[in-house]
Each structure stands twice: as structure tokens, then as C-alpha cells.
Image: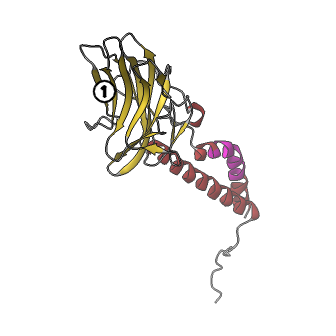
Amino acid sequence: MKSASRPRKTDNLSESAYRYLNLCATAAGAALIGILALSQLSEAKIIYTHTHVVLSPNPNHPDLNYNLDLNHDGITDFVVDDNINQCSRFSAVWTLGETAANGNGAQGSPPEALSRGSRIGHGQHFFGGDGRMAFKDCPNHFSGNWLRATNRYLGLKFSIGRKTHYGWARLSVQEGRFSFIVTLTGYAYETTPGKAINAGQTKEAADDSTNEAGRGASVTKPILDIPQPASPGILALGAQRDPLRRKESALEGDLRSR
């Protein structure tokens, strides 16, 4: 008695089926890469704080300090010190300086007045002591990198939980009647340990590397700028959507004909 014939088992897929499966695998891999890249971007951000602080010592208040807390954790990271010392009835010494907390440092010695877009990060020289930004002695000789500086940037290196972070503070310096008039208009830092930041940078996106945040931020309400670029995986899937449909139709026709 002959046994009932069974359907013949096919071990090999057609060439079009293989191409379709390879295309699916490629798209899935691109999507995974896109997800990983987007995850890394979401973890990295720059915290920018817009503020307006003016230091202008006078004979009644000869020493004014500002405690700069870059990450708002209640710990002073740097001190900006603007003071006057009388050396005669008609003249005085003016000194503008910065002091870094233990383990922190300002870029340059004496501190540099960086231009917008300057790199602040590993490989730069950061001085951890007291830095003299501008100075006037009794014979009225002026000196210092920050003399008559307008919207220049102080490059900063500081620690959060034993990890190094980089940031900046934007200041302007003018000569007043009694002393230097110093205006602090903003500061920012990179949340990713060890990652460099550009002077004036408030966004992670490369094309907006020195684009400052809009109005409305304050010391207690920093502006967070987190870019949302299109995922490379999503772009790859979008570009391949039509070929996938054509391959799917070809595969269905091939299977029906078998």
C-alpha cells in the first residue's frame, strides 16, 4: 500500500526572499544604531543660566564678591572679587580677580578673556590659584587681560562628585569712578564629565554650538536646551520604506507561485 504523498519540503528560499530578509536586517541594524545615538544625546546637555549681576565697589563698600555656583548645588565653585584699596588721598589700587574653589581652575594664568566660540576643555591650561583679571595701581597704570573687556568668557573647570566638568562665565569690565565695574550676564556648564564646551555655547547641537538661549532664564530657573535630532535609524527606515514594500510584494508573489 502506498503511503499518502506529503508536500515536498523546500529548504532554500528564492533569491528575492533572501534580498528581502537582508534588507529587513539592514533596516533593523540602522534603527538600533539610531536609538543608541539618540540615547546618548538625551543624556548630554548644557545647563545655561541667564543672570545680571553688577559689582561696583565704592569707598563705603570697598570689597564686593560674587560666589559663582555653576550647577546650583549650593557649593561655591568660583569667587569673583572686585575691590579697592586706598593708597593715598587721591588714588587707590583697583583689583579684579577670581578665586577657584579647591580642585577647580580658570583657563589661563592670568585668566584669559576668551572670545565667543573658544574651546574650553581637556588640553587647555587651567590655573587653580587666585587669578588677577584686571589691575590699576596708584600711579594709575592699568593692566590685565580683562581690562575694558565686553562680553568675554572666563573658561572654567570644576568638579561634580570627583568628576571634571567644563563651563564658562560671561563678563564685561569697565572703568568706573572708584573701581572696576564688573557685569556678569550668564554662565553655563556641560553635564557630561570630561566633555569640552565652547565659550557662549548653550546647546549640544553642533550647528548651534554658540547659540545662546532665549530670554526668560534666571539664577533659579536655568534654561535647558536639549536638541532632538532625527534618529539615523528612523531616517534609514524612511528612505527604505518604498523598496521594502516592493520587496514584500515580490516575496508574496514568489511564495504564491511555489
- Circle 1 sits on which residue? 66
- What is the number of callouts on the image? 1
Is 100 situated above or below 149? below
In this rendering, would 19 be left or right of 115?
A: right
Say what secondary structure mark 1 lies in: strand
Residue 251, position as x, y percentages in the image: 70, 57
Q: Please check the rendered image and state whether residue 246 is part of the magenta-colored stretch, yes or no.
A: yes
Magenta stretch containing residue 129, yes or no? Answer: no
The quarter of the image holding the N terminus is: bottom right
Q: Amino acid at mark 1?
A: Tyr
Magenta stretch, main secondary structure, is helix
Residue lying farthest to the right in this orientation: 15
| Residue at figure coordinates x 34%, y 11% from the top left | 90
Residue 76 against residue 90 in the figure, above or below? below
The image quarter containing residue 255 is bottom right
Q: Is residue 53 visible?
A: no
Is 121 on the left-hand or right-hand side of 87? right
Q: Position of residue 122 (x, y in %)?
A: 51, 48
Q: Is residue 176 left or right of residue 21?
A: left
The magenta span reads: 236-249
- Establish if 178 lies above or below 218: above
Residue 183, image x and y in percent?
40, 19
**Left or right side of 72 for 121:** right
User: Alpha-carbon neighbours of circle 1 within 10 Å: few (<14), some, or many (≥20)?
Assistant: some
Nearest the camera: 111 or 38?
Answer: 111
- Quarter of the picture holding the C terminus: bottom right
Of 76 and 23, the residue lying toward us: 76
Query: For residue 137, which quarter of the picture?
Result: top left
Q: Between residues 126 and 250, which one lies in front from this camera angle?
A: 126
Q: Is residue 67 visible?
A: yes
Q: Position of residue 220 (x, y in %)?
A: 30, 26
Give the residue at the far bottom of this rendering: 1
